[in-house]
Image (tube, grey):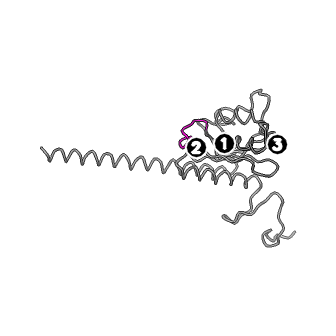
Amino acid sequence: MDQTPAIETGVFDANEWFDDVSGEFMTEQEKYMKAALRLAHKAAEEGEVPVGAVVVCDGKIVGRGRNRRETKKNALHHAEIEAINKACKKLGGWRLHRCDLYVTLEPCPMCAGAIINARIKTVYFGAADPKAGSCGSLVNLFDLPYNHQPEIVSGLLGEECAEVLKSFFRALREKRKMLRMQQKSDALEAFDHRIQEK
């Protein structure tokens, strides 16, 4: 069997795509998770917890979303809710039974409920969420006897998705530490100034 790489022969598996950035082939599912990761990075740039989501129908992204709770000052602005909302508008209905959802972080209870109500076929998530994950980590709401039970595929590009979150929180902790140090320095300076005035 010919072992020549597909990039050289021009022969590609219909379910694989070439990633120009990494120089590697991706499955169809990885391609959609990469799209969700780009949205997560955008959320991080905006100072939001980096979570991104896309809704896919018949091989096309029909809804995109990213976490915007801080920006919008609204607890409902999770990536999954935004992506589902846009998909409903684009497809002209609330039933997304032909759609899959790709999200970088395991959905919370609110988002799991929206996924059930939208009749999403399959949920692909990257990083597990041990604090609020409702698709297997803390609880699996899809196992309950609701009228719809989406399939779950967990851990898709899980390390990459988790690293985006870890990097964001590491930088946030460092920023807070620097702010506390600056506040202490300012307080000492103000105290010294008062002492010198006496």
Looking at the image, is mark 3 or mark 2 earlier in the sequence? 2
Residue 68, label in figure: 2
Measured Cα–Cα span from mark 3 to mark 2? 26 Å
Asked whether 190 or 132 is in front, the reply is: 190
Residue of label 3:
98
Q: Decide: few, some or many residues near mark 1? Use Cα within 10 Å; few <14, some 14-19, many ≥20.
A: many
The residue range painted magenta reads 69-76
Queried whether the magenta region covers residue 27, the answer comes back as: no
Residue at 67% across, 64% down = 22
Q: Amino acid at mark 2?
A: Arg
Residue of label 1:
82
Q: Amino acid at mark 3?
A: Arg
Q: Quadrant of residue 131?
A: top right
Placement of the C terminus among the 4 image quadrants? top left
Residue at 54% across, 50% down = 46
Looking at the image, is mark 1 or mark 2 earlier in the sequence? 2
Expressed as whole percent of the image width and height from the top left, the position of residue 125 reads 69, 45
In-image side of 113 versus 43 (left or right):
right
Expressed as whole percent of the image width and height from the top left, the position of residue 144 reads 74, 28
Expressed as whole percent of the image width and height from the top left, the position of residue 78 reads 62, 40
